Amino acid sequence: MMIRSLQSVVDRELAWRSLSPRGALGIVRRWRAGKLLALSDIYIPYRLYQIKVDDHRVRSTRFLAVDAISGALDPYEFAESPLHGRCVEVDAANYLPAQLAEDDSRTLVLEKVRRLLFSGGFFRLVKPAITTNLIGEFYIPYWAGFYGEAHNVSVLMLNAVRGTIEGSKASNLVKSWLLEHSSNDTPVPA
């Protein structure tokens, strides 16, 4: 299926090297998780919101994207909308469907913006008015590394935009998605 995705900066070869490093880190990873068995590109849906903060002294606009599955993954912040210029059309077989209702993701965005305002000097604002507008949806590309043995596989996620290894939240989303596919007797993505 064709989807709109942020452009990946990590190709398959770099992902393989990152998820199966040489040296001490590679030895520790193989000891803990096992050998890297397979690598697959997986796309996670995000919703992009335009956030306007209006105070009598301060006016700002930012773009914040939250995952549309659980809202638990780290948000993306942009100075301008990435939908034109930073996104590409991708023919993807492995993409997770959005699960959060739009109202729920909007509530999560408001909570995250309030936390950002508070941590950045909220007390300087007198009475901020925060408005959110849904701009659109897009996917973030990830590389999933599958480790272990055939009967006991673990997943490690590499963000293909940031180039960083993700924590357990991203891995758990993908594991749940794979288990859902296997329990529905539908083919597991390649």
Image (tube, grey):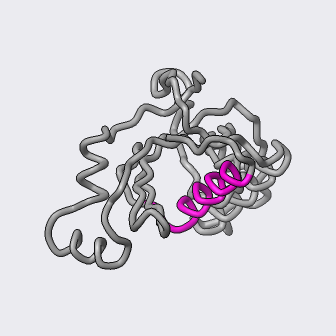
The image shows residue 95, relative to residue 118, as above or below, that is above
The image shows residue 18, relative to residue 60, as above or below, that is below
Locate the N terminus by quadrant.
top right
Task: Name the residue at 76% across, 49% down.
Answer: 105
Left or right: 185, with 142 as reference point: right
* Nearer-the-camera pick, 85 or 143: 143
Task: Name the residue at 59% across, 38% down.
Answer: 95
Q: Quadrant of residue 157?
A: bottom left
Q: Position of residue 69 (x, y in %)?
A: 70, 50
* Nearer-the-camera pick, 120 or 144: 144
Residue 54 seen: yes
Q: Quadrant of residue 27?
A: bottom left
Q: How many marks overall?
A: 0
Residue 46 seen: no
Q: Position of residue 24 (x, y in %)?
A: 17, 75
Type of secondary structure dominating the magenta stretch: helix
Left or right: 76, with 132 as reference point: left
Task: Find the magenta span and give its range.
Answer: 166-183
* Nearer-the-camera pick, 186 or 86: 186
Task: Name the residue at 43% across, 44% down.
Answer: 40
Q: In the displayed image of the protein, which residue is found farthest to the left?
A: 23
Task: Name the residue at 60% across, 33% down.
Answer: 138
Indicate yes or no whether the magenta region holds residue 34: no
Indicate yes or no whether the magenta region holds residue 172: yes
The image shows residue 183, relative to residue 186, as above or below, that is below
Q: Position of residue 23 (x, y in %)?
A: 14, 70
Left or right: 140, with 103 as reference point: left
Q: Position of residue 73 (x, y in %)?
A: 59, 58
